Amino acid sequence: MIAAILEALQFAFMRHALLAGVLVSVACGIIGAYVVVNRIVFISGGIAHAAYGGIGLGFFFKYNLLPLLFVNAAAALDQRPGYFPLVGAILFSLAAALVMGLVQRRTRQRADTIIGVLWAIGMAVGIIFVDLTQGYKVDLMSYLFGSILAVESSELLIILALDVIIVVLVALFYKELLAISFDETFATVENVPVDVIYLLLLAMIAMTVVMLMRVVGLIMVIAMLTIPAAISGLFVKDLKRMMVLSSFLGMVFTTLGLWFSYSWNLTSGAAIILVGGVTYLLSLMVHPVLLRARRRRLEQAEA
């Protein structure tokens, strides 16, 4: 296995893929813990699919509007094919997250209905703008199912910047995020701006979703966002430890998934999710056994 990994790392695209997996795992572990604790998996999925609208807008802007403003824009930007879709996805997913959060907290409509509608609108907007893009047609499957092997150096810089933003925001507002995650009423009594902090959390979820989009695709974002955190939640209860363990598990899953995809010519995003999913099922079986063993030790110590 080690020899195969070293052989794969001789290629630049594999080094980029591994680095992207590590960077994404950091944000995924931190934000995934909040998603699991707050039980907002569905809204995370809504943000993920709404982000597709930004991809369509990014391609439309790049190939239709920029050439009108700058004569040599199209030729120059072809050297960075993933830059504008990624930026478009960031902006669109942030807007969708804020709209979902505001509507959810300030109207009496069912939250799942609102999220479902915005989910569908985002996907439809993305597909329509891709259809309207003249000439070049993007490979939709690469964004729906991930293309970690095609991550470029410019995209790595964007992912790194998003990582830094998320880590800084969580460090600055950790107590407030902790308060709204476990006792929103107490947070309100303590004058914590609950709505603002909640919208901040959704914004960080949106940024994480965009990073995951390049690794496992929009369809499997929910799995990668929740599986490491769900496994961590079985074995640790402290939120900080949960974040650290989730980040580590994400790195393990992406590394093993890349190795499987390279060795057996599999789709990398699906391989990463399969590794994580199997690990979660094994954790569900191991967890009760460990709990029983712990109870026996405690009983023997008390006796």
Image (tube, helix red, strand yellow):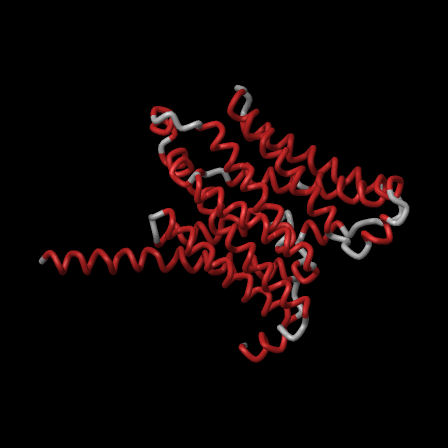
Q: Residue at x 54, y 49 (%)?
A: 164
Quadrant (top left, top right, bottom left, bottom right) of the C terminus: bottom left
Q: Residue at x 73, y 52 (%)?
A: 82
| Image location of residue 30, percent across then percent down | 47, 48
Q: Which quarter of the figure has residue 69?
A: top right
| Image location of residue 182, percent across then percent down | 37, 36
In this rendering, the count of numbered labels is 0
- Residue found at the far top of this picture: 108
- Viewer-proximal residue among 139 and 197: 197
Q: Residue at x 69, y 56 (%)?
A: 154
* Left or right: 86 as drawn, with respect to 162: right
* Left or right: 207 as drawn, with respect to 121: left
- Viewer-proximal residue among 238 and 231: 238
- Viewer-proximal residue among 276 and 188: 188
| Image location of residue 296, percent across then percent down | 20, 59
Q: Residue at x 73, y 46 (%)?
A: 85
* Left or right: 59 as drawn, with respect to 234: right
Is residue 131 shown above or below 99?
below
Is residue 138 shown above or below 64?
below
| Image location of residue 109, percent across then percent down | 55, 21
Q: Which quarter of the figure has residue 45?
A: top right
Quadrant (top left, top right, bottom left, bottom right) of the N terminus: bottom right
Q: Which quarter of the figure has residue 174?
A: top left
